[in-house]
């Protein structure tokens, strides 16, 4: 049986409410209020859920270190469907996060059979987009990164095939490289903490990527030497696989603590302080001291023809490198929430919430909230008709792409310095 959320399936997004109850994803609402100057994807309810994002909001508020990481599979040109994650990463960098982007060429090669050469070229396009949007930080291709591959191997010591089949629905027929690409993604998510030291890490993703997050949180926990828990009146530090010396170091660090076989009870010290001290001791004894990664989940923009946006359905989106007339055609032919006839639309109004053209504006093309609600109001009132609305939307899209391409040219040197010029 296939699990309900599977990163490689082509089904539409499962119902958000169900995800919260069945998988333990928390609704973003209560945290959203704590974010000053919230970006559009928070204000507009595009990011709906999270795991442990409170830590990241704390870090932003308190200006303490945190990482933000995401990955892109370079199996085709970057397109409209990738833009949300890109904006989320850039926003977190601007909010004080240390940025990381993985080009998941191992995954593309294993899962989509993309040649290494094509992975290189597509990967650079993703990087151009990111830098053009204002990204700063570390980028890498999985296949070049030895530290990452070693980390993936270490992570693999904590995962067996029944875990993989429970999480991803893998079967006897699943290729070994596909399985390896999942553990490589686990390593991607933990990599910032190897490269930049342990710190909360946020991974903004679409809901389909949650299985990777769950697996990574499980692995991060299993790779810890200790579990640290608040008990009534004291903090308990239990060894999972800590060397004897490390347990001793914990009890030495807290005079008055009680040391037992395999665990130490600490009175009179707060949980946070004990957590930090044990993390450091773990590192001193050759462990990782990982924070379990945090994540945010955004809804998907519908494809321009309705249904899921996917690179295997070219009419469902456009790339940022596409001919202008082709982009225009796709927008003018998009599905709308309009009525059968003009008369009906004037009388009843359109249905913007289920309209891909409106969603395109909501997700990306109209950053101004009052302009956006004016589009919605005029549509609902039957004052705005689809032909005009599409033309206006196309004008915004064309301006966006023009500007985006110019920015890409102005950052091309960054990508070329790191990964060489394009050979084509
Ligand atoms: N699997 C992701 C995709 O299909 C790409 C990816 C690779 C990724 N490594 C990652 C996403 C780490 C988030 C975090 O697009
Ligand atoms: Fe969609 Fe615009 Fe038509 Fe309303 S007027 S249904 S928003 S295309």
Image (cartoon, rainbow, N blue to C red):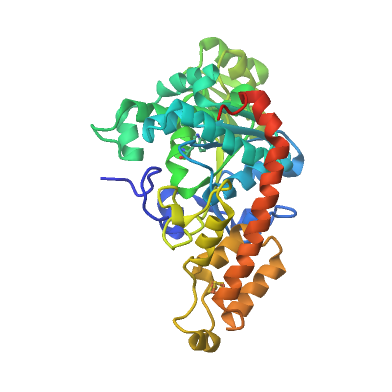
Residues 48 and 268: in front is: 48
Spot occupied by residue 278 in the image (x, y as percentages of width and height): 61, 23
Q: Could you tell me which residue is drawn at 59 percent across and 29 percent down?
A: 422
Residues 418 and 363: in front is: 418
Residue lying furthest left: 172
Residue 114 shows in this picture: yes
- Residue 196 in the image: above or below residue 380: above
Q: Could you tell me which residue is drawn at 65 percent across and 63 percent down?
A: 395
- Residue 268 in the image: above or below residue 129: above
Q: Could you tell me which residue is drawn at 59 percent across and 78 percent down?
A: 379
Tell whether 308 sits left or right of 385: left
Spot occupied by residue 417 in the image (x, y as percentages of width and height): 68, 24
Residue lying furthest top: 245
Residues 106 and 290: in front is: 106
Q: Quadrant of residue 374?
A: bottom right
Spot occupied by residue 71 in the image (x, y as percentages of width and height): 53, 36
Query: Which quarter shows the C terminus?
Result: top right
Tell whether 173 sits left or right of 318: left
Query: Which quarter shows the N terminus?
Result: top left
Spot occupied by residue 255 in the image (x, y as percentages of width and height): 68, 19
């Amino acid at each position: 049986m296939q699990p309900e959320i599977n990163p490689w399936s082509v089904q539409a997004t499962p119902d958000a409410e169900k995800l919260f109850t069945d998988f333990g994803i928390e609704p973003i609402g209560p945290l959203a209020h704590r974010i000053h100057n919230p970006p559009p994807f928070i204000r507009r309810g595009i990011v709906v859920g999270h795991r442990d994002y409170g830590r990241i909001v704390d870090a932003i508020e308190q200006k303490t270190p945190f990482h933000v990481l995401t990955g892109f599979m370079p199996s085709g040109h970057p397109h409209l469907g990738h833009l949300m994650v890109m904006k989320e990463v850039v926003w977190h960098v601007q909010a004080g996060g240390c940025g990381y982007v993985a080009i998941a060429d191992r995954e593309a090669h294993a899962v989509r059979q993309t040649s290494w050469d094509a992975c290189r070229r597509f990967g650079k396009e993703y990087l151009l987009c990111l830098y053009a949007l204002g990204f700063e930080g570390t980028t890498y291709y999985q296949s070049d990164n030895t530290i990452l591959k070693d980390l993936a191997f270490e992570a693999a010591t904590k995962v067996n095939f029944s875990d993989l089949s429970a999480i991803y629905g893998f079967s006897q027929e699943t290729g070994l490289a596909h399985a390896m690409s999942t553990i490589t993604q686990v390593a991607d998510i933990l990599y910032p903490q190897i490269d930049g030291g342990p710190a909360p890490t946020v991974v903004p993703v679409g809901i389909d990527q949650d299985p990777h997050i769950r697996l990574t949180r499980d692995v991060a926990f299993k790779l810890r030497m200790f579990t640290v828990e608040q008990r009534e009146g004291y903090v308990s530090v239990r060894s999972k696989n800590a060397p004897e010396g490390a347990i001793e170091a914990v009890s030495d660090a807290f005079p008055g603590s009680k040391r037992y076989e395999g665990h130490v009870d600490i009175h009179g010290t707060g949980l946070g302080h004990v957590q930090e001290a044990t993390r450091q001791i773990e590192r001193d004894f050759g462990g990782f001291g990982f924070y379990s990664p945090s994540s945010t989940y955004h809804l998907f923009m519908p494809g321009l023809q309705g249904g899921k946006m996917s690179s295997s359905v070219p009419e469902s989106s456009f790339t940022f490198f596409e001919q202008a007339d082709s982009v225009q055609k796709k927008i003018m032919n998009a599905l709308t929430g309009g009525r059968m006839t003009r008369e009906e639309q004037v009388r009843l109004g359109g249905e913007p919430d289920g309209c891909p053209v409106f969603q395109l504006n909501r997700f990306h093309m109209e950053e101004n909230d009052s302009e956006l609600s004016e589009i919605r109001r005029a549509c609902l009132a039957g004052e705005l008709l689809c032909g005009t609305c599409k033309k206006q939307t196309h004008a915004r899209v064309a301006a966006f792409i023009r500007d985006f391409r110019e920015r890409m040219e102005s950052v091309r040197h960054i990508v070329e310095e790191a990964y060489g010029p394009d050979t084509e």
